[in-house]
Image (spheres, rainbow, N blue to C red):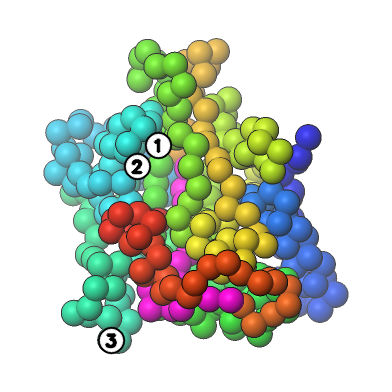
């Protein structure tokens, strides 16, 4: 049975060349074989994520009528209500993203990735906590992009230079308890099986029975463990395309709220690192990636086509 790898980033942050090479090798293997891994030794602190969860829970506890003022479609900015997607998932979320459009983007089609965020009036501290989370998430993502570059024997700034004006997106995802959602239809999930459309997603998760699962190369579904202090790192469709499918964008899902734990509610914090929408995704200048069957495409164009013109994190 395939296990989801756990990689300690401490040697990477120490700066030792041999340690950094080993981290890059371990991450490469995980993305090739599974497409999902856990990382520890990063600077995203528990007090920061605890603070954001406290604020997010206050928001999700608001009456639906209050949240409805911020309602949006999946992948948008604001509140995505239960069943807001195509599969009637048992989940609510709140999304926000980068508002700092790079020079030359305003007035173009790519400006859609930098729309203004909306924030709930009833939880005024949410914005500050979310901003602190995304600031730290950006820093962790930048280091992981350097890890990816080393894994493929690319220049150290190959990815970071293409993400410098990125269209990042974040989601606060709340999974209500079984006693809250009531009956569950056959096959209904907290989140149905899917792949991420973008590049790299970093998720801080809470442990629970209604857990995250990933589909292996053999087609089996395996649990993604929830290790204290670890971030779950998921490769998206765009990263798989960029590497000529060397790295997997693996289908994953979140199980329904468990009958045996009717009070279990979980809240995940996800940061999606995305490149400048004008960045060209094409065959990488490295033998590690090998040939590709994909035509060159800009990151913005690909995500529009993948998401039906909706910005998706």
Lower position in the chain sequence, tag 1 or tag 2: 2
Rendered position, 247 above or below 242: above
Helix, strand or loop at disc 3?
loop
- Name the image quarter holding the N terminus: top right
Q: Residue at x 39, y 16 (%)?
A: 185
- Residue 20 coordinates in the image, percent (x, y): 77, 72
Seen in the image, is 28 located left or right of residue 256?
A: right
Q: Can residue 169 be seen from the camera position used here?
A: yes
The image shows a total of numbered marks equal to 3
Rendered position, 107 above or below 83: below
Residue 104 badge: 3
Rendered position, 142 above or below 178: below
State the residue position of label 2: 93
In this view, the residue in front, 208 or 156, is 156
Q: Range of the magenta residues?
A: 268-283
Task: Tell me the distance, in whole angstroms, between the alpha carbons under discs 3 and 1.
Answer: 36 Å
Helix, strand or loop at disc 1?
strand
State the residue position of label 1: 174
Q: Residue at x 67, y 62 (%)?
A: 246
Q: Are marks 1 and 2 in contact (CB under 8 Å)?
A: yes
- Residue 273 coordinates in the image, percent (x, y): 48, 64
Res 307 quadrant in image:
bottom left
Q: Can residue 39 be seen from the camera position used here?
A: no
In this view, the residue in front, 206 or 257, is 257
Helix, strand or loop at disc 2?
strand
Task: Tell me the distance, in whole angstroms, between the alpha carbons under discs 1 and 2.
Answer: 6 Å
Q: Residue at x 20, y 32 (%)?
A: 64
């Amino acid at each position: 049975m395939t296990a989801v790898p756990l990689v300690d980033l401490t040697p990477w942050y120490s700066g030792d060349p041999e340690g950094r090479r080993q981290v890059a090798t371990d991450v490469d293997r995980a993305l090739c074989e599974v497409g999902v891994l856990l990382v520890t030794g990063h600077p995203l602190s528990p007090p920061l994520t605890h603070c954001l969860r406290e604020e997010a829970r206050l928001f999700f506890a608001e009456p639906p009528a209050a949240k409805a003022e911020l309602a949006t479609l999946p992948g948008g900015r604001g509140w995505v209500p239960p069943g807001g997607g195509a599969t009637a998932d048992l989940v609510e979320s709140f999304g926000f993203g980068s508002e700092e459009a790079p020079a030359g983007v305003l007035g173009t089609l790519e400006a859609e990735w930098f729309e203004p965020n909306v924030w709930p009036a009833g939880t005024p501290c949410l914005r500050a906590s979310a901003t602190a989370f995304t600031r730290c998430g950006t820093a962790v993502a930048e280091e992981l992009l350097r890890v990816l570059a080393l894994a493929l024997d690319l220049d150290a700034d190959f990815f970071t230079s293409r993400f410098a004006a990125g269209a990042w997106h974040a989601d606060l995802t709340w999974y209500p308890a079984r006693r809250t959602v009531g009956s569950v239809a056959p096959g209904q999930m907290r989140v149905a099986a899917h792949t991420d459309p973008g590049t790299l997603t970093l998720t801080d998760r809470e442990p629970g029975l209604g857990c995250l699962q990933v589909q292996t190369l053999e087609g089996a579904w395996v649990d993604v463990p929830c290790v204290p202090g670890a971030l779950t790192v998921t490769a998206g469709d765009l990263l798989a395309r960029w590497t000529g499918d060397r790295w997997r964008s693996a289908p994953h899902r979140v199980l329904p709220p468990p009958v045996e734990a009717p009070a279990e509610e979980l809240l995940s914090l996800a940061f999606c690192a995305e490149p400048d929408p004008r960045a060209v995704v094409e065959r990488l200048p490295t033998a590690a990636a090998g040939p590709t069957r994909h035509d060159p495409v800009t990151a913005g164009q690909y995500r529009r086509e993948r998401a039906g013109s909706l910005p998706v994190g």
